[in-house]
Amino acid sequence: MISYAEALEKILKESRSYASEEIELKEAFGRVLSEDIYADRDYPPFHRSAMDGFAILSRDYLPNQNYSYHRELSAGKSMDLEPEEKTIRIMTGAPVPEGFDVVIKIEDTVLSESNGQKIVTFSLKDVKPWQNIAKQGEDLKKGDLVLSKGVGLGTSEVSILASLGKNKLAVVKPPKVHIISTGNEVVPVYTSPLPYQIRDSNSYTVSSILSKYKIQPELVTHVPDSESEITNQIQQGLEADILILSGGVSMGSLDLVPAVLQKLGVELIFHKTAIKPGKPIWFGKRKNTIVFGMPGNPFSVQTCSRIFLEPFLRKSFGQNQIPTYKLPYSTTKQKKGLFTEFFPVRLETTDKTYLSPLTFNGSGDVRAGITSDGLAIFPSETSSIQKEDLVQFLPW
Amino acid sequence: MISYAEALEKILKESRSYASEEIELKEAFGRVLSEDIYADRDYPPFHRSAMDGFAILSRDYLPNQNYSYHRELSAGKSMDLEPEEKTIRIMTGAPVPEGFDVVIKIEDTVLSESNGQKIVTFSLKDVKPWQNIAKQGEDLKKGDLVLSKGVGLGTSEVSILASLGKNKLAVVKPPKVHIISTGNEVVPVYTSPLPYQIRDSNSYTVSSILSKYKIQPELVTHVPDSESEITNQIQQGLEADILILSGGVSMGSLDLVPAVLQKLGVELIFHKTAIKPGKPIWFGKRKNTIVFGMPGNPFSVQTCSRIFLEPFLRKSFGQNQIPTYKLPYSTTKQKKGLFTEFFPVRLETTDKTYLSPLTFNGSGDVRAGITSDGLAIFPSETSSIQKEDLVQFLPW
């Protein structure tokens, strides 16, 4: 059976490249750029006053001396200095006029009037050139690469795109996804199950993960363990870019999914990997369609989505992977066997931030993952984790 | 000037309680529960086989002995044992019939046939009662509280709500929000600014933060620094639950927002707090409307949104605050003064996970925050951070 690392590598090797689409900036939060973004001008575009106060030339500065002034410059306007004009009142965001190189905060000034003449004196012992001024181009030069293709757009990225005037931008177009849950025991969420039935949670799980990537699945459906019904539904699903199945991939006599997939010409890339939960996962492709056959237990689907589906999507979107963190563990944990195990943890902070386990009865536990911050990885070759050991952490 | 802690306390003290609304489960990801959720039945609802294999009674078990069998039970069906029926083939997810208490994995069996009779022998030396069976109610008992009011719905929470049949559920109804950016220098994103103008990024920043809380602002607009225009727009904004302004709250002669707010009867709760960036923030209320007057610099708005607006929303939604983590710092950093400072950091993992600073030219830096994972806090009373020091971290 292949290892977790091998399984992930095989999945990433099959990454696709999806089309891009143009959207408006106000729809951009959470999307992934599919164009490089360059600075349209210098930022700041001018020597910008960073304070409300007075502009002056550092060479002319003397503490506790009277300077007369008569003009005021606010943001959004500009001004050329008059001959012999030694200082002006200036506001945050205004362009510092050519001839000045210092802004003194209003808090460091004393204002007065003498014979109808406005006077300012400064209390600072000395000043440094460019004090309280954001110099033109200090953040970005015109033409600088600001954001690269593949960057996920959070608040700071949306903010700079607005500053740069990217009212419209190219982002990755979500692929077409079909979700099929299988199983005779599975009934829709809105029904009252019979004693030996359970409700379909897996299609909701997968849809939730997809919504993080702004993917609205084209079809979400359920089929019983009937070869003809599974065949029909998979046939339709193979028209999508990604087909995600849950259930029917294990060792039972009604686990029909692998056989149907192969009968329909889907090439098997791997079946089963040495992980827990999620061991029976089936992965394959037909032409441009990628097929994830996930196991049926709810926490197996959550885990396989996080460790396999999301990395596939991110690579296909040109996006960096979510980093794996290494944080100290809050207690001890043992395992038997040589599988790589994944279990839900919370980040808990006392003197520092620890990974702390949650109650977890295994992959069929409907509670598993609730209020967790992500998954911890118990590596294959390790059989015990001690308090303070650094453990790999995958945030949700 | 009040401290960061005092400012946050004053803001949280004004938290409101918003109405709830019923939505469908498929819309629930990212919303916040406004009802308590109880288990509708035991989970598992029956003694569920966790493996594909054979069910047997532990008392009857003997290794390497022939057991004849003739029936198979798959998920979604149930079965009463026949007299003298010592074992059945059973599939993952099927209910273990009364009279059996063990499931033996198919991998630990040998199947054969003798005189048309199907025979199984087991290779395990011994078995333990309830081996490979998820016992009825081991995850949840009927009536257990599963999720409380105020829980944010991630993948695991959506998954269990589906299992529990919560096709419809009550969540917090987003409050009505108006966003007003101010400033004569500010022009819309789709225009070419004059040399001393900049584009409006703040309303996009605030809208992005709000979208994390599924709030679609009712109005997003910009006004120049004109008392009458600001007055008209704020008057309209005071009909919302939350009014968020940016710009016009500092010391400049055109910083008209505080005076207009007070003239319109908005009670000042505080103006300015000892933080950087974000010092000039103005916070107040009129009847049920909460007013955030944020400074105009882009990173000030990102910071104030994260450290003040989000905590306000979460408390008002009945949701826990995003925890503050404590992680080791990757390098050294100095500061002057007694303000609490916030700066963008990335999580970087080498031997363990560190907070690592990003280039940051201050609150007016349009790049600030790009590709960062959150904000680090430089506490007011501290003047230097050393490598390996534990630093508070606020993820975005």
Image (spheres, coloured by chain):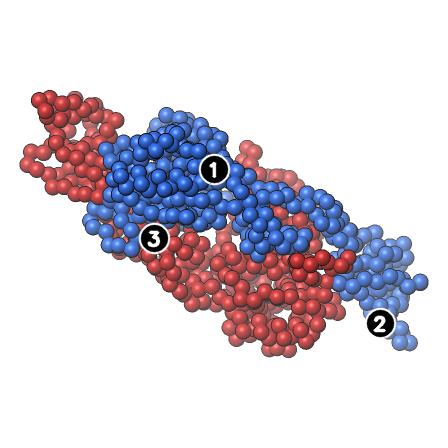
Chain colours: A blue, B red
Name the residue: 61% across, 72% down.
B234
Q: Describe residue A225's horizontal placement relative to residue B309 as left or right.
A: left
- Vertical side of A65 occupied by A225: above or below: above
Nearer the observer: mark 3 or 2; the answer is: 3
Q: Is residue A354 left or right of residue B277?
A: left
Q: Earlier in the sequence, mark 1 or mark 2?
A: 2
Foreground pick, B199 / A382:
B199
Q: Is residue A4 visible?
A: no
**Residue type (three-letter) at the residue carrying disc 2:** Ser
State left or right for residue A314 relative to residue B68: right
Tell me the amino acid under the disc marked 3: Leu
Using the image, tell me which numbered label, if any, was put on residue A312: 1
Q: Position of residue B59 (x, y in %)?
A: 13, 32
Q: Chain of mark 2?
A: A
Question: Does the rendering let one see residue B211?
Answer: yes
Q: Picture quarter containing residue A103?
A: bottom right
Mark 1 chain: A
Q: Which residue is mark 2?
A: A112
